[in-house]
Image (cartoon, rainbow, N blue to C red):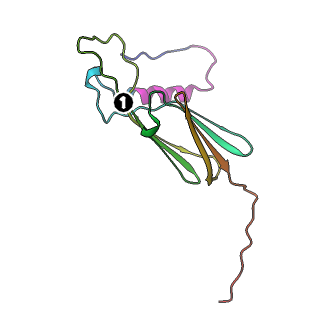
Amino acid sequence: MDFIKIRFGGDFEDLSSKIEKTIEGFFRPRAINPTFNCSECAWKPSMDIYETVDEIVIIAEIAGVAKEDLEVEINNRAVRIHGKRPGTPPAASATYRLAEIQYGTFERVLYLPVPIDSNNVSASFLNGLLKIRLSKLPLDKTHKITISDS
C-alpha cells in the first residue's frame, strides 16, 4: 500500500511536480508479489541534467545495469537512454520482507533545451552512474549561402 504524504504549510513551490510523481507512481505497473515480476514492467531511473556555457551534462543513476545492457541514442534535440537491469531471484526458501528495487527494462527520452553537436558527445559509466556530455551548437554561427542563377 502506498501512502500519500500531506504537508500543511507554505511550501508550494514544487507542489505540481510532487502531485505528478504521486499520480505517476499510482499508475506505474508493478508486480503484486516480487516473485511474479513482469519482464515488460518498466522502471524509471533518477537523472540529473545541468547546463554550462558550452555543454549539457546528463547523469543517470542506474546501479546494477551492465554497460553491455545500455543503449544511448542522440540527435540534435533529444537523448534516448534505454537499458535493462536483471532481477536477482531469491533463494527457494526465502520470504520477502521488503521489495523496493525495481528490475526490468527502462527507457528515458530527454528533450534538450538547445541544439547539440551530435558529433561531439562523450559517455562514461562508473559506479552505477552513466554520465553523458553533449556539446552545444553555437547559436550565433551564421552560414553564407550562395545564390544560384535559375
Extreme-bottom residue of the structure: 150
Q: Which residues are magenta?
A: 8-25
Residue 14 is covered by the magenta coloring = yes
Residue in the picture at 28% in, 31% down: 38
From the viewer's perspective, is 138 left or right of 30? right
Residue sitting nearer the eye, 26 or 54 = 54
The residue sitting at 76% across, 58% down in the picture is: 140
Dot 1 amino acid type: Pro
Which residue is at 44% across, 34% downward?
66
Q: Looking at the picture, does residue 38 appear above or below residue 1?
A: below
Q: Is residue 42 magenta?
A: no
Q: Which residue is mark 1?
A: 86
> Dividing the image into 4 quarters, which one contains the C terminus?
bottom right
Q: Which residue appears farthest toward the left when viewing the image?
A: 92
Which sits in the foreground, 6 or 32? Answer: 32
Q: Position of residue 103 (x, y in %)?
A: 37, 28
Where does the image place residue 14, in percent across and percent down from the top left?
60, 26
Tell me if residue 97 comes above or below residue 87 in the rendering. Answer: above
16 in relation to 109, above or below = above
Q: Residue at x 40, y 19 (%)?
A: 100
The quadrant of the image that shows the N terminus is top left
Position of residue 89 in the picture relative to residue 59 (left or right)? left
Looking at the magenta stretch, what is its main secondary structure? helix
| Number of numbered callouts drawn | 1
Dot 1 falls on a residue whose secondary structure is loop
Counting other residues with Cα less than 10 Å from the Cα at mark 1, is it few (<14), some (14-19), or many (20 or more)?
A: some
From the viewer's side, name the closer residue of 99 and 7.
99
Residue 67 in the image: state x and y as whole percent. Answer: 47, 37
Q: Horizontal placement of 140 versus 111: left or right?
A: right
